Amino acid sequence: MKRAAFLAIILLIASGCRSTHQISQNPVKMDFERDEVWVLTGMRQKEINYKDDEERITIQFNPETHNFAGYSGCNRYFGDYDYKQESEFEGELRLSRIGSTKMMCPDENMKLEDTFLPLLGKTTHCTITAYKLKLMQGSKVLLEFEKL
């Protein structure tokens, strides 16, 4: 009897450890979080390479106010967003009322910014996981970000 109880306890402990391990390997359902900074790593399927001293292009979402903001390579930008989750890691995303400051910068930065900002307005969908965010137009990836 003691042996059967001991065996049952060992099996429960082992199965509990196994299921906990499996759960920890599964991805977690994600949504935008306040003050979470995303850094641009790709634009139109091309990798973005920053110089060591260069400020990164970023985006942040505020789910409480449905606003977003960031740095676009030369200027600060901002706008509103609507997000509707469609599946575990995908959703419809519309960025609207996009505005920015109007400072002058080196031509290289301005060119990058002039490409980046219009792509925000073309966004219709996104995929989001713990560390990656992709802004898409339909199934076409426009912008790729990693969590800072």
Image (cartoon, rainbow, N blue to C red):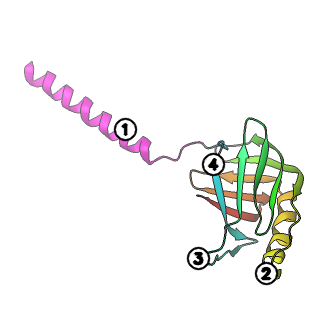
Q: Is residue 125 magenta?
A: no
Foreground residue among 110 and 28: 110
The span picked out in magenta is 1-29
* Residue at mark 2: 108
The answer to whether mark 1 and mark 2 are in CB contact below 8 A is no
Circle nearer the N terminus (3, 4): 4
Residue 52, labelled with which disc? Answer: 3
Image quadrant assignment for residue 131: bottom right
Circle nearer the N terminus (1, 2): 1
148 left or right, relative to 57: left
Residue at 64% from the left image edge and 53% from the top image edge: 37
Circle nearer the N terminus (4, 1): 1
97 left or right, relative to 25: right
> Could you say whether the residue bearing mark 3 is in a helix, strand or loop?
loop
Residue at 73% from the left image edge and 53% from the top image edge: 126
Foreground residue among 138 and 5: 138
Instruction: Work out how far the residue at label 3 is from the one at label 4, CA to CA, in angstroms.
Output: 22 Å
The answer to whether mark 3 and mark 4 are in CB contact below 8 A is no
- Residue 26: x and y in percent read 48, 46
**Which one is in front in this view, the residue at disc 3 or the one at disc 1?**
3
Circle nearer the N terminus (3, 1): 1
**Which one is in front in this view, the residue at disc 4 or the one at disc 1?**
4
Question: As displayed, is residue 102 above or below residue 10?
Answer: below
- Residue 51: x and y in percent read 63, 78
Majority SS type along the magenta span: helix
Circle nearer the N terminus (2, 3): 3
Amino acid marked by disc 4: Glu
> Could you say whether the residue bearing mark 1 is in a helix, strand or loop?
helix
**Which one is in front in this view, the residue at disc 1 or the one at disc 2?**
2
